[in-house]
C-alpha cells in the first residue's frame, strides 16, 4: 500500500530525492558538531589556547552554517514534493471516481468520498512530508550518534543499545491499541459529513418543518462520538513522550554517572581517532550525543504515532484508487447508435447493496420479466405508483446500471456492446432530481453541447418553454445560476434541464417525471414542441399525471417492478384497471383544466 502511494510523487521524485539527500547531509554535519565541540574544550578552553579556540570555533561555525543550509533546503524540497504528491493523489482519485457507476458511488457514499479526497489526503500528505525528513533524519541521527558514542566508549554505548528494543516494544503496544480506534473514528467522520451534506442540501425542508434543534442534536451526537474516539487515541498517544523521555533520561543519567567515573579513572577511549583517554570534552560530547539520541527517539516516536493515525487514511485512499468501475466498455465496442429503437428482452434487475464497503446483489428484484419493444421515434408514456420501478426501467437504457438478467437493446444492439460515451451521447436523460450547476445559463446549456451557438441554445430553451422566463432575467442567457440552482424556481430548473438534454440532439430522450413542477399548460406546450420539432427522437416520459402521457403512441403501466399493461390511452381505459383507476381519480380532481384550455 505504501509502495503504491509513494508512486504518486511521479514528477516530484527529484524534489523528494533532493529532500532526503539534504536531510542526510544535515544529519552527518550535526553528528560531527559535538566532536568538534569536544576538541574545542580539550584543546582550546582547558589549555587556554586562543589559537585553538579560534580555529575550532570557526570550524564549528562553518559546519553549523552548512547544517542550517542543508536543513532549509531539505524543508523547501519536502514542501515541493509533498504538495505535488497530494495534488497527484487527489487528481487520480477524482478521475477514478468519475469512472464509477452508480453502484460504485453507493458503495462508498458521497460523503465518504469527499472525506477521502480532502481530510484523508491532507493527513497522508502531512505524514509523508514528515516522513521524508524525519524518517530518514532521525534514524540516521540515532545511528550516527550511537556510532560516535561507540567510537568514544563502547561501554557507554551499551546503555543506548539496551534502551532501543525496550522503546520499540512500547511503540508496538501503543500502535496495536490506537489503530482500531482510528478505524472507527474515520467511519464516524463519514457519518458526520453525511449529516452536514444532507442538512445543507435540505436546509429549506429543515426550516419548513422547524427541525433545527433535532438536526443540531443529531450533529452533536456524531460529533461527540468522534470526540470520544480521538480522546481515547490521544490518551494512548500521550504515553509516547513519558515512555521515551523516561527511557532516554535514564540513559543520560547512567551515561553521566559512568562517564564521570571514566574521566576520573582516566579510562581509555575505544577508538584512537578520539584520543587516548576519556576527557571532559569527550564526556561533554557524550551528553550532546545523548541529547541527539533523545531527540531522535522522540521524533521517531512522534512519526510512529502519526503514521499509525494515518494508516487508516492510507487504506481509505487506496480503496478509492483501486476501485474498478463495475460498468466498463467492452473490448471492441460499437461506435454508432443506428436509431432510437429500444427492446427489453426478459429483463430482470436487482439493485446492489452495500455491506461494509463491499457490493452484493439484493435478493429482491426491482424489475422482473420485462419484455418491451419501442420503435424509433415513438412517444412513450410510463406511469405507475411510487416504487413501481419506473425510473429503474429507464436507467437501464443509458446503462447507468446493468441488467441482472436478460438484455436491453438500443438501435438493435445490446447496450453492453456500445462504447459508453457513444451510448450516453445518443441518450439524453432528464433525471428526477434536477441538477443545475454553478455558472451562467449558457454554461449549463453547453453541458449538452460544448460547441453550441447562442442560436442553438435559444432554440432548445424555446422548445423547453424556458426562453420566456430567461428573457425576464437581468442578464438573460448570461444570468448567473447559484450552486444547486437556488436562485431559480423548481419549475424553471426543470425546464433548463430539459433544454440542456435537447442540446445533445439525442436519438432517445428520457423525461423522468421532469415536468412535475410545471403547470399543465406549460407541460402541454413542451409535449407539443417535442411532437413537431423532434419527431424522429424516441421520447420516454415518466409522469404522475395522465394528461402528460395520454397523447403518447404507447403507454406502459408499471406495478411492483413488472409491466402491468401496454397500449394507447383508449386501450388502457378499457383493459387496465390500474390505469383506469388513476385516470378517474385525476379527472375527479379536475387537475387537467389548464391543459384543456390550452388545447382549445
Image (cartoon, helix red, strand yellow):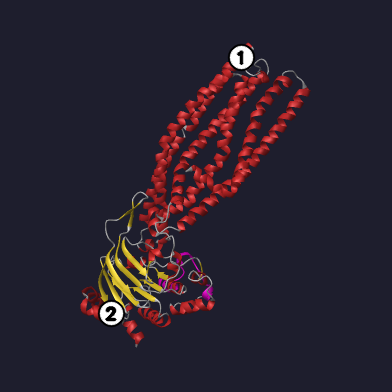
Residue 422 x/y as whole percent:
45, 67
Q: Residues within 10 Å of mark 2 (few under 14, many from 20)?
A: some
The residue drawn where x is 49% and y is 39% is: 307
Disc 2 target residue: 568
Tell me the tag on residue 262: 1
Q: Nearer the viewer, residue 469 or 72?
A: 72
Residue 357 x/y as whole percent:
37, 50
Considering the numbered disc 1 on the image, is that residue within a helix, a strand or a loop?
A: helix
Disc 2 or 1, which lies upstream in sequence? 1
Q: Nearer the viewer, residue 77 or 68?
A: 77
Q: In the picture, which quadrant includes the C terminus?
A: bottom left
**What is the magenta range?**
474-496
For residue 267, what is the image quadrant?
A: top right
* Above or below, comparing residue 17 to residue 405 in the picture: above
For residue 502, what is the image quadrant?
A: bottom left
Magenta stretch encompasses residue 413: no
The residue drawn where x is 50% and y is 78% is: 458
For residue 151, what is the image quadrant?
A: top right
* Above or below, comparing residue 430 to residue 142 in the picture: below
Q: Is residue 311 visible?
A: yes
Magenta stretch encompasses residue 493: yes
Left or right: residue 247 compared with residue 15: left
Residue 333 x/y as whole percent:
43, 64
Q: Is residue 472 visible?
A: no
Closer mark to the observer between disc 2 and disc 1: 2
Residue 68 x/y as whole percent:
67, 37
Contact between marks 2 and 1 (CB within 8 A): the answer is: no
Q: Nearer the viewer, residue 412 or 512?
A: 412
The residue drawn where x is 45% and y is 65% is: 421
The residue drawn where x is 39% and y is 49% is: 220
Q: Residues within 10 Å of mark 1 (few under 14, many from 20)?
A: many
Tell me the tag on residue 291: none
Amino acid at each position: 500500500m505504501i509502495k503504491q502511494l509513494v508512486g504518486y510523487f511521479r514528477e516530484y521524485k527529484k524534489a523528494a530525492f533532493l529532500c532526503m539527500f539534504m536531510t542526510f547531509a544535515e544529519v552527518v554535519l550535526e553528528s560531527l558538531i559535538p566532536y568538534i565541540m569536544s576538541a574545542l574544550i580539550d584543546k582550546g578552553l582547558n589549555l587556554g589556547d586562543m589559537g585553538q579556540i579560534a580555529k575550532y570555533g570557526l570550524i564549528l561555525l562553518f559546519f553549523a552554517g552548512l547544517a542550517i543550509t542543508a536543513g532549509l533546503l531539505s524543508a523547501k524540497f519536502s514542501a515541493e514534493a509533498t504538495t505535488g504528491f497530494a495534488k497527484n493523489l487527489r487528481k487520480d482519485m477524482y478521475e477514478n471516481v468519475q469512472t464509477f457507476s452508480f453502484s460504485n458511488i453507493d458503495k462508498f457514499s458521497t460523503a465518504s468520498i469527499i472525506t477521502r479526497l480532502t481530510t484523508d489526503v491532507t493527513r497522508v500528505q502531512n505524514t509523508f512530508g514528515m516522513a521524508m525528513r524525519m524518517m530518514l533524519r532521525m534514524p540516521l541521527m540515532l545511528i550516527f550518534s550511537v556510532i560516535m558514542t561507540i567510537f568514544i566508549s563502547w561501554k557507554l554505548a551499551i546503555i543506548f543499545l539496551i534502551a532501543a528494543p525496550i522503546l520499540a516494544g512500547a511503540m508496538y503496544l501503543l500502535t496495536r491499541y490506537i489503530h482500531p480506534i482510528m478505524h472507527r473514528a474515520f467511519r464516524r467522520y463519514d457519518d458526520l459529513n453525511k449529516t452536514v451534506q444532507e442538512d445543507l442540501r435540505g436546509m429549506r425542508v429543515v426550516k419548513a418543518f422547524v427541525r433545527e434543534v433535532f438536526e443540531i442534536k443529531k450533529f452533536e451526537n456524531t460529533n461527540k462520538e468522534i470526540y470520544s474516539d480521538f480522546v481515547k487515541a490521544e490518551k494512548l498517544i500521550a504515553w509516547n513522550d513519558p515512555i521515551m523521555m523516561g527511557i532516554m533520561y535514564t540513559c543520560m543519567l547512567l551515561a553521566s554517572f559512568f562517564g564521570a567515573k571514566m574521566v576520573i579513572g582516566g579510562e581509555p577511549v575505544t577508538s584512537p581517532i578520539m584520543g587516548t583517554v576519556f576527557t571532559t570534552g569527550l564526556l561533554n560530547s557524550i551528553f550532546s550525543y545523548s541529547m541527539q539520541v533523545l531527540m531522535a527517539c522522540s521524533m521517531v516516536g512522534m512519526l510512529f504515532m502519526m503514521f499509525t493515525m494515518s494508516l487508516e487514511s492510507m487504506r481509505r485512499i487506496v480503496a478509492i484508487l483501486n476501485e474498478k468501475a463495475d460498468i466498463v466498455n467492452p473490448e471492441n465496442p460499437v461506435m454508432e447508435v443506428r436509431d432510437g429503437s429500444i427492446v427489453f428482452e426478459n429483463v430482470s434487475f436487482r439493485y446492489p447493496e452495500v455491506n461494509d464497503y463491499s457490493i452484493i446483489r439484493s435478493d429482491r428484484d426491482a424489475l422482473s420479466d420485462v419484455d418491451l419493444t419501442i420503435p424509433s421515434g415513438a412517444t412513450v408514456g410510463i406511469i405507475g405508483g411510487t416504487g413501481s420501478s419506473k425510473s429503474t426501467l429507464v436507467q437501464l437504457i443509458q446503462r447507468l446500471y446493468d441488467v441482472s438478467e436478460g438484455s436491453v437493446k438500443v438501435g438493435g444492439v445490446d447496450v453492453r456492446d456500445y462504447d459508453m460515451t457513444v451510448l450516453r451521447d445518443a441518450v439524453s436523460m432528464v433525471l428526477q432530481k434536477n441538477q443545475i450547476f454553478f455558472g451562467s445559463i449558457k454554461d449549463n446549456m453547453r453541458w449538452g453541447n460544448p460547441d453550441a451557438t447562442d442560436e442553438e441554445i435559444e432554440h432548445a430553451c424555446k422548445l423547453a418553454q424556458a426562453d420566456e422566463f430567461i428573457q425576464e432575467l437581468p442578464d438573460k442567457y448570461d444570468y448567473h445560476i447559484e450552486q444547486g440552482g437556488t436562485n431559480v424556481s423548481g419549475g424553471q430548473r426543470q425546464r433548463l434541464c430539459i433544454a440542456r438534454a435537447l442540446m445533445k440532439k439525442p436519438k432517445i430522450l428520457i423525461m423522468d417525471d421532469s415536468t412535475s413542477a410545471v403547470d399543465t399548460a406549460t407541460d402541454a406546450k413542451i409535449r407539443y414542441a417535442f411532437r413537431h420539432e423532434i419527431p424522429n427522437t424516441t421520447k420516454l416520459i415518466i409522469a404522475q399525471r395522465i394528461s402528460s402521457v395520454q397523447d403518447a403512441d404507447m403507454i406502459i403501466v408499471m406495478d411492483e417492478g413488472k409491466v402491468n399493461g401496454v397500449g394507447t390511452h383508449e386501450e388502457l381505459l378499457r383493459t387496465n384497471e390500474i390505469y383506469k383507476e388513476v385516470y378517474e381519480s385525476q379527472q375527479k380532481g379536475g387537475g387537467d383544466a389548464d391543459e384543456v384550455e390550452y388545447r382549445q
